[in-house]
Image (cartoon, grey):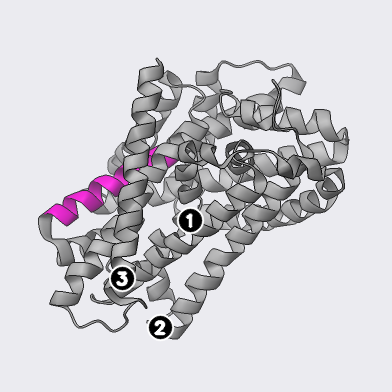
Amino acid sequence: MLALPVANAATGFWQSSVFLLICWAIMTLGALLILEANLYLPPGKHMVSMAAATLGKPGLLAAWLSYIFLLYTLLSAYISGGADVLGSLLLPLNIHMAEWQSSLIFTMAFGVIVYGGIHQVDLLNRCLMFGKLAVYCLLIVFIAPHIQFTNFRQGNYHYIASTIMLLITSFGFAIIVPNLREYFNDDLKQLKRVILIGSLIPLICYIAWDAVIIGSLPTEGTNGLAALMHNEHTTSALAATLANTVENTFINSCFNFFTSICMLTAFLGVSLCLMSFLADGLKMEQRGKNGLLLFLLTFLPPLLIVIYYPGAYIHALNYAGVFCVILLLLLPALMVLFGRTKFKPRYQVPGGRFTIWLVITFSIILLINSIWQLFGVLSGY
């Protein structure tokens, strides 16, 4: 949510909106493929079990590695962004902290809530989500009058190559499809409806958010949105740019509140998912000595990444896109391709083999593009 306007500014609002629509469509197909593959097995089975049943040990290994790297990369991004927000909130109090200090305090303070278990996280997250939705609507309404329609004519679609993985990451909802199947008691009609509507809501929110931010703030210049892509403190720099442009204390306060909640809800959700995944995979209880070890395994690797690679927010989200493609597009397509020969499907994604090969082709193109971008970055050093 916070990174999208910064990433999409150079591409341009209209061009990036088209790519958002394409990414939504392909990721929704991926979600439906996950649903089909999950229905091969009894309820309660998730991505790792699905990959093992349809693709054997190679699929099991690929799912394990993609899952763990995706969650670690996302958690690194949210620790980086959360530490940036925390540091900017403390500045008015004349409290100055180094990057590693704010990262450590943010991780420890809210990691303790995750250690407390799902009920504590659920209770806090519900309150935060209602607050986030309310502030989001307020920001859309109050920033909209500052839109300058000339800003919508800027940008070049060529820049999408370096940011499309972030767009893919924005639709990483499909990882919860197996949980939805359990929640809706195998009601196939309801599941298809939930996947479609549940994916459309963020698409609409993203486009509306891009419209008000890209339309209100300059793209070019030292303080423009495009320049923030290379800023180590993306979120606080975006807040400062908005403050200088709209000159409205109420909007600034709402935006700071919004960025704080965005980082916190994302951090809590991914942390809980990662800790549960590690506990299940390593067959460990989330209490006592095992709980403390799980706490370290969950938070220490991403914290070290952020400390030794400061300003990792947008870069980490881009890298997370690689694992999103493998876990939520390529693997589901392959699971269905081979699964249809082993199981009698209760549900088949429309389009037959064409849909499967479309998703596989799109996945390979995205992965090749990511490798190309990585070599471009490395050659720039």
Residue 63 among magenta residues: yes
| Residue 91 percent coordinates (x, y) | 72, 21
* Numbered disc 2: secondary structure: helix
User: In the image, is 314 to the left or to the right of 142?
Assistant: left
**Location of residue 84 with respect to 281 vertically, above or below:** above
Relative to 245, say whether 348 is above or below.
below
> Are discs 3 and 2 less than 8 Å apart at CB?
no
Query: Sequence order check: which comes first, mark 2 or mark 1?
Result: 1
Residue shown at 41%/18% (left/top)?
Answer: 380
Query: Residue at image x 35%, y 33%?
Result: 372
Residue 36 drawn above or below residue 16: below
Secondary structure of residue under mark 1: helix
Crowding near the residue tagged with mark 2, few <14, some 14–19, many ≥20 C-alpha atoms within 10 Å? some
Residue 17 place in picture, x, y as percent: 61, 53
Compute the Cα span from label 2 to label 1. Answer: 24 Å
Disc 1 marks which amino acid? Cys
Q: Mark 1 — residue?
A: 23
Is 218 magenta? The answer is no
- Residue 283 visible in the picture: no
Name the residue: 30% across, 37% down. 293
**Residue 354, label in figure:** 3
Which label sits on residue 188? 2
Judge depth for marks 3 and 1 and give the one in front: 3
Q: Bounds of the magenta span?
A: 58-75
Q: What amino acid type should be assigned to the residue bearing mark 2?
A: Leu
